[in-house]
């Protein structure tokens, strides 16, 4: 009876820790995304992804604590699963990571006037995978965030903001 109670306490503690870490990450990423002018869909997608990761951590812990799976089995299966997902979503993951970095470094925001690869216009939408630029003629150009972060990107409206933030003279 004591062993079962210890297992239950351990599982609850790990589940609570996973939820706290997930909420902390969601708060940090959401603040960065909001300051960059991201839409609510980006925030929803980040929350869903973090919640999924927390659920996987909790389920794997429950399986380990109950003895249905060992750490080695879970590690092997999660490694294989991660490899499959990474290879299948390589381009998408690259764009998402670049999107998070664009949000956090503050190089671009909504309504900034930018020029990228000969396309000059205003940023009208920023998401995790891509950024939409509306040209002066009204054409929408959708650029993947990994391409945008690799540059060269000229941001005409962020000079003052970025100069103060990074002490550029």
Image (tube, rainbow, N blue to C red):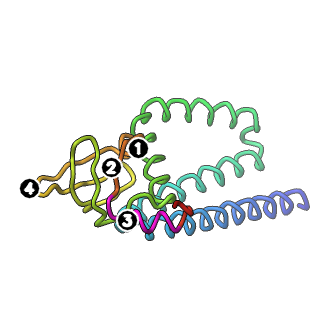
Percent position of residue 153, x then y: 35, 47
Q: Which mark is residue 137?
A: 4
User: Which element type, helix, strand or loop, lies under badge 2?
Assistant: strand
Percent position of residue 92, x then y: 39, 40
Q: Quadrant of the N terminus?
A: bottom right
How packed is label 4: few (under 14 Cα within 10 Å), some, or many (20 or more)?
few
Query: Residue 146: within the magenta?
Result: no
Sooner in the amino-acid sequence: mark 3 or mark 2: 3
Tag 2 near tag 1, CB within 8 Å: yes
Sooner in the amino-acid sequence: mark 3 or mark 1: 3
Tell whether 38 sits left or right of 25.
Answer: left
Tag 3 near tag 1, CB within 8 Å: no
Image position of 162 with respect to 101: above or below:
below
How packed is label 1: few (under 14 Cα within 10 Å), some, or many (20 or more)?
many
| Residue at image mark 2 | 130
Q: Which mark is residue 34?
A: none
Sooner in the amino-acid sequence: mark 3 or mark 4: 3
User: Which element type, helix, strand or loop, lies under badge 3?
Assistant: loop
| Residue at image mark 3 | 38
Sooner in the amino-acid sequence: mark 2 or mark 1: 1
Tell whether 162 sits left or right of 54.
Answer: left
CA separation in Å, label 3 and label 1:
15 Å
Tag 4 near tag 2, CB within 8 Å: no
User: Which element type, helix, strand or loop, lies under badge 1?
Assistant: helix
Magenta span of residues:
156-164
CA separation in Å, label 1 and label 4:
27 Å
């Amino acid at each position: 009876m004591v062993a079962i109670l210890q297992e239950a306490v351990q599982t609850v503690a790990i589940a609570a820790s996973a939820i706290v870490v997930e909420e902390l990450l969601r708060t940090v990423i959401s603040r960065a995304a909001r300051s960059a002018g991201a839409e609510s869909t980006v925030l929803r997608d980040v929350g869903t992804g973090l919640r999924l990761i927390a659920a996987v951590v909790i389920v794997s812990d429950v399986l380990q604590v109950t003895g249905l799976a060992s750490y080695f089995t879970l590690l092997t299966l999660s490694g294989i699963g991660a490899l499959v997902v990474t290879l299948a979503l390589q381009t998408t993951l690259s764009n998402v990571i670049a999107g998070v970095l664009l949000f956090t470094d503050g190089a671009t925001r909504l309504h900034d006037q930018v020029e990228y690869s000969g396309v000059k216009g205003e940023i009208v939408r920023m998401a995790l995978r891509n950024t939409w630029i509306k040209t002066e003629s009204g054409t929408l150009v959708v650029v993947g965030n990994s391409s945008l972060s690799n540059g060269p990107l000229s941001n005409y409206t962020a000079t003052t903001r970025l100069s103060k933030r990074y002490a550029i003279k």
